[in-house]
Image (cartoon, rainbow, N blue to C red):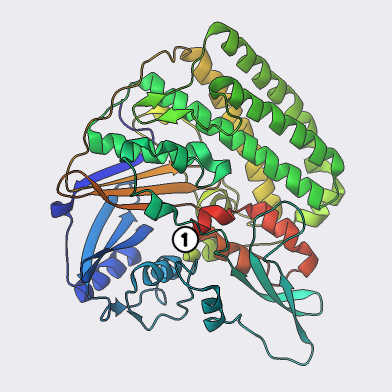
Amino acid sequence: MKASMTAHQVAVDAIPRLEPGPWREDLLKQLRADMRVVTLVGRRDLDRVAITAVLQASDRSLRVSRTEVAPERGYHEMTTEHAALHCFERELHEQTGVRIAGHPWLKPIRYEGQEQSAMRSHPFYKIEGKEVHEVAVGPIHAGVIEPGSFRFMCLGEQVHHLEIHLGYQHRGVERRLLERDPRSLTPLIETIAGDTSVAHAWAYCSALEGLAGCQLDGETELARAVALELERVAMHLSGLAGMAADVGFLQGATTYGRLRTTAINTMMRLCGSRFGRGALRPGGVRMRLPPETLRDIRANLELLQADLPIINDCFLMARTVQHRLRSTGTLTTAQARELGLVGLAARASGIELDARHLMEHGAYSVVPIQPAVLPDGDCWARARIRIAEIEASLSWISTVIALYPNWEHPPLSIGELAPNQLAISLVEGFRGEVVHCIETGAHGEVVHYKVQDPSLRNWMGLALAVRGNEISDFPICNKSFDLSYCGNDL
């Protein structure tokens, strides 16, 4: 069976290469023709930097192009015309030192390898005004959450501007991925973002298996998709519990939290870890579905499908919930498209973008799944998208384990990786598309490993969504996006 998610592999020598100027013009021309940027990555190659752009066409095919530049010469920025590139160009400049002339805001994403004092060279944006005041939140927060600095410019209670400053979780993940045998990286990959272990592990396995010429059977692909959908159910329930707590709807907070425990315990029953660690390995899965486990899984799914409609009705009908979530943190379709948002945040703003949809091969072609899309773009829409996706995922899992209960396929061995290849894989995690790019050198060694969590693209969406809202609405907006700090910081 072919891959269940978008996967693309191309020989490095076959990637179209252009000089920086023509490459830039060609890239902008394709973006004007409604192609979508998936990623833009760069790597040092002696005294040059190879910059690779990956675009996606409406038929879901990927197109790769490359240029090579001298870092001190670089190229002229593209962010002004295509704002979705802003995070990629900032990251490219930060990681390779490439000069990007004319860029409106080359603030580093993570301050990699620099002193913390370097942050002072990019002070927070300020708004002048007699009654304008500034509110600083973080980077250390109350409660057990990750560090991030939020700077609000407010007039009274109304937020006029929010700047989000991250990077405190930077661990040098991508550099670490080059230090080991590429076939033994799963434990590290699974901890890139702990709540997205399965999605990142699947993206890694898919890219690696492509490079090794390893093709999996259909049941293994379905087993991986079951783990991915369980992760989606668990994290959407966590998000709903958080949103309910933030608006003081404690019945929702406690019940969604209880049901999340059922979801993660189901995952533990399959693989021994509530967060799906150890479920996937290159060449197969470590999950098994003997009759006694299948019985428990079905019982848990029945419990979730019986209890969720009850609390969903309470949550959706509660006036206090509607009052706090409707028209709060709105991001229009045009804004979401301009920023290149992905995942549930994009779908809640009317953009039908889901890597699982309309797949011709793999698990989601055997049992198709329809994306949930709403046009409103507010916190209410993001909550309802979660509810719809939980229902769809539970129904999908129930169907799959009824039709394909045999997961007893031994894992395939992964041989040497093909030399001089670039493999790209996209997996639809619960936040959005997880992208992994692996490039091999002349002897099959990995020369570049790029990881992209959906949070990288969606943080700016949160910053825009809170404009015009009261500052007290920020926790609700923040939870409705539910973005990852460590997934961004890497």
Q: Is residue 134 above or below residue 448?
A: below
Q: Nearer the viewer, residue 471 or 184?
A: 184
Q: Amino acid at mark 1?
A: Gly
Tell me the residue that label 1 is attached to.
340
Estimate the x, y position of residue 10 in percent, counting from the top left: 20, 47
Q: Is residue 356 visible?
A: no
Q: Residue at x 22, y 38 (%)?
A: 417
Estimate the x, y position of residue 208 in percent, counting from the top left: 31, 38
Residue 134 falls left or right of residue 297: right
Q: Residue at x 35, y 21 (%)?
A: 411
Estimate the x, y position of residue 124 in percent, counting from the top left: 61, 80
Estimate the x, y position of residue 350 in percent, counting from the top left: 55, 53
Q: Nearer the viewer, residue 45 or 16?
A: 45
Q: Residue at x 61, y 82 (%)?
A: 125
Q: Is residue 401 above or below residue 391?
A: above
Q: Residues within 10 Å of mark 1 (few under 14, many from 20)?
A: many
